[in-house]
Every structure is written in structure tokens, then in C-alpha cells.
Amino acid sequence: MGLPSRHRLKRRWEFQSVYKQGIRRSSRHLIIRALPTTENCHDQFIDAKIGISISRKVSKKAVVRNRIKRQIRSVFRYLLPKISSPWLIVVIVKPEAQECNYEHFLRELEQLLIKAEIIHGN
């Protein structure tokens, strides 16, 4: 099962604001861009919102790209309760991510979110 609709970035302006103003953290297979939401945002978010960007450079096959997106969404279903304040988060997938499995994405995303101070590493 994927992420609920209220936890997804959908609008172009949401992605653009994260790219322009958000912080950037990267690892070997993934990059995250994250923007904490404030009162002057267009919408009042009560939940974190996640977007995934994966280009054809990762794989020419849509099946492979969609599998990676499903795995990342599944990881965020596990990690969302740990995110305390509302954030806009975009995950950018690097071409090397084809070799990753669910556990690897979980470990790597958790480390990136701790590095970005979105969740606290306890």
C-alpha cells in the first residue's frame, strides 16, 4: 500500500519551493531536499508531504523506476510517525539506486533524515 494522499507532494509549486529554498542532504544512492513549512506557506500543512523524483537516467524501464518509487513510499510509511513537524520532502533517486533493496533504502533514508534533523536519531 502506498502513501496516503495527504502525505504526497503533487503540485508543481510545492516541488519548486522545496528545490529553491529547501536544505539538501545526499548519500550514495539518494538525495533529499527538505523544507520546513511555515505560516506564510500557501497551504497549512499538518502532515509531512513526500515527493519522489526519478529520471530516465536511473533506468529506461518504467517497471524498474516504479518499483523503486514503491519501495521508497513504503519506507516513508514506516518513517512518517517519526517526523514530528510538517516538512515538504523531495527524494531524488540517483542511477546507482537500481541495486538497492527495501532494507537499504530504509537505512539510507533514515540516516539522511537524521542528518537533515528532520527526525531525531535515538
Image (cartoon, rainbow, N blue to C red):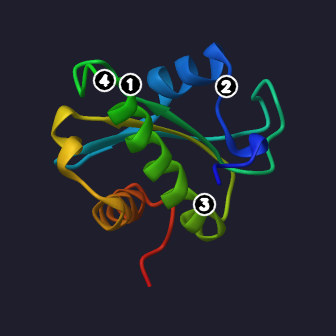
Secondary structure at badge 4 equals loop
Distance from Cα at disc 2 to Cα at disc 1: 19 Å
Distance from Cα at disc 1 to Cα at disc 3: 22 Å
Q: Amino acid at mark 3?
A: Arg
Quadrant of the image containing the C terminus = bottom left
Residue 10 marker:
2
Distance from Cα at disc 1 to Cα at disc 4: 4 Å
Provide residue 35's location: percent of width, then percent of height. 55, 39
Using a 10 Å C-alpha cutoff, classify the residue at mark 1 as few (fewer than 14 neighbours), some (14 to 19) or many (20 or more).
few
Residue 77 marker:
3
Using a 10 Å C-alpha cutoff, classify the residue at mark 3 as few (fewer than 14 neighbours), some (14 to 19) or many (20 or more).
some
Eye-nearest disc, 2 or 4: 4
Distance from Cα at disc 2 to Cα at disc 4: 23 Å
Can you tell which quarter of the image residue 1 is in? bottom right
Is label 3 in contact with label 2 (beta carbons under 8 Å)?
A: no
Distance from Cα at disc 3 to Cα at disc 4: 25 Å
Is label 3 in contact with label 4 (beta carbons under 8 Å)?
A: no
Secondary structure at badge 1 equals helix
Q: Amino acid at mark 4?
A: Lys
Using a 10 Å C-alpha cutoff, classify the residue at mark 4 as few (fewer than 14 neighbours), some (14 to 19) or many (20 or more).
few
Residue farthest along the bottom direction in this orientation: 122
Name the residue tied to disc 1: 62
**Between disc 3 and disc 2, whose residue precedes?**
2
Using a 10 Å C-alpha cutoff, classify the residue at mark 2 as few (fewer than 14 neighbours), some (14 to 19) or many (20 or more).
some
What's the residue at 39%, 65% (across, down)? 110
Is label 1 in contact with label 3 (beta carbons under 8 Å)?
A: no
Please give left or right for residue 19 compared with residue 24 in the image. Answer: right
Front residue of 121/73: it is: 73
**Between disc 3 and disc 4, whose residue precedes?**
4
Secondary structure at badge 3 equals helix
Name the residue tied to disc 4: 61
